[in-house]
Amino acid sequence: KRASREFHPEDSVFDIEGVKVGGGNKVIIAGPCSVDTVENVVYLAKVAKENGAHMLRGGAYKPRTSPYSFQGHGEEGLKMLLEAKKETGLPIVTELMSIEDIDVVYKYADVIQIGARNMQNFPLLKAIGKLDKPVILKNGIASTVKEHLMSAEYIMSEGNEQVILCLRGTRTYEPSVRNTLDVTLVPIMQKMTHLPIIIDPSHAAGKREFVSALAYAGMAVGADGLIVEMHNCPKEALSDGDQALLPRDFEYLMKKLKELKPWN
Ligand code: PEP
Ligand code: MN
């Protein structure tokens, strides 16, 4: 199979707007959960950049549990991300939820994020498989490693081999965290696949105070990078404020990560 080490023994390395992902390169992606205002997004992009992040994240199409919650600014939000990219040069990572938004998201995104809720949306996976654009594929709400890898196959079998796997935890019987992220899966999956594996400590921890420790753990076991949520005013964030790192937390995390000697 295309994602497996048997098929492709060397690590895949992707060049995304000059940022190398995979093969021992460590990619740091930071930014708000939802894009809210252009001022906040540009500010957060600058904080990300100044502290050594390589890409900017931000959602303009949000998969919310409640239909009454903020659903994202849509193309207006994508324009705010583009403004932040112009200011900082950071490539844009943003979620695509539906086939109907492919054209507009394609236009602004440098990396298309497929969220946990869409990990097994097979028509969507096939559709992005036809694009020439890197993809971050998150694991599903309660998916297994094999299911996650099979979803990567759906994208790759259509021709798009630029898939980055993201571990964001799964739902378990443990209620003290939002999702349980087993960092053992990083080396386990690295044996199975040549694709880069990054972790998302934010949606796993669910609370700001535990995000950095989990990020550190994931990088220590050899993850190829992380995608982390950050906000300058989490109380006013339109989604996931409780798990957003403050700029100073992000600065501290980046300092700690520089001291880290990864396992592999
Ligand atoms: C997100 O990245 O904000 C998000 C919705 O993540 P997930 O799909 O992992 O829940
Ligand atoms: Mn979020």
Image: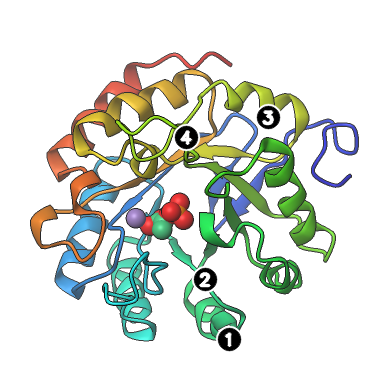
Residue 96 image label: 2
How crowded pointer 2 is (Cα within 10 Å; few <14, some 14-19, many 20+) is rated as many
Residue visible at 29% across and 33% down in the picture: 211
Foreground pick, 201 / 111: 201
Q: Tell which tag, 4 or 1, sits nearer the viewer.
A: 4
Q: Secondary structure at mark 4?
A: loop
In the image, taking residue 240 as reference, residue 151 lies left or right, namely right
Residue 137 image label: none
How crowded pointer 4 is (Cα within 10 Å; few <14, some 14-19, many 20+) is rated as few
- The percent position of residue 73, horizontal first and vertical second, equals 31, 80
Residue type, label 2: Leu
- The percent position of residue 125, horizontal first and vertical second, equals 69, 66
Q: Secondary structure at mark 1?
A: helix
Q: Secondary structure at mark 2?
A: loop
Q: Which quarter of the rendering shows the N terminus?
A: top right
Q: Is residue 95 visible?
A: yes
Residue type, label 4: Thr
Q: CA distance from mark 3 to mark 2?
A: 25 Å
Foreground pick, 131 / 62: 62
Q: CA distance from mark 2 to mark 4?
A: 26 Å
Residue 172 image label: 4
How crowded pointer 1 is (Cα within 10 Å; few <14, some 14-19, many 20+) is rated as few
Instruction: Locate residue 206: give its quadrant.
Output: top left
Residue 189 image label: 3
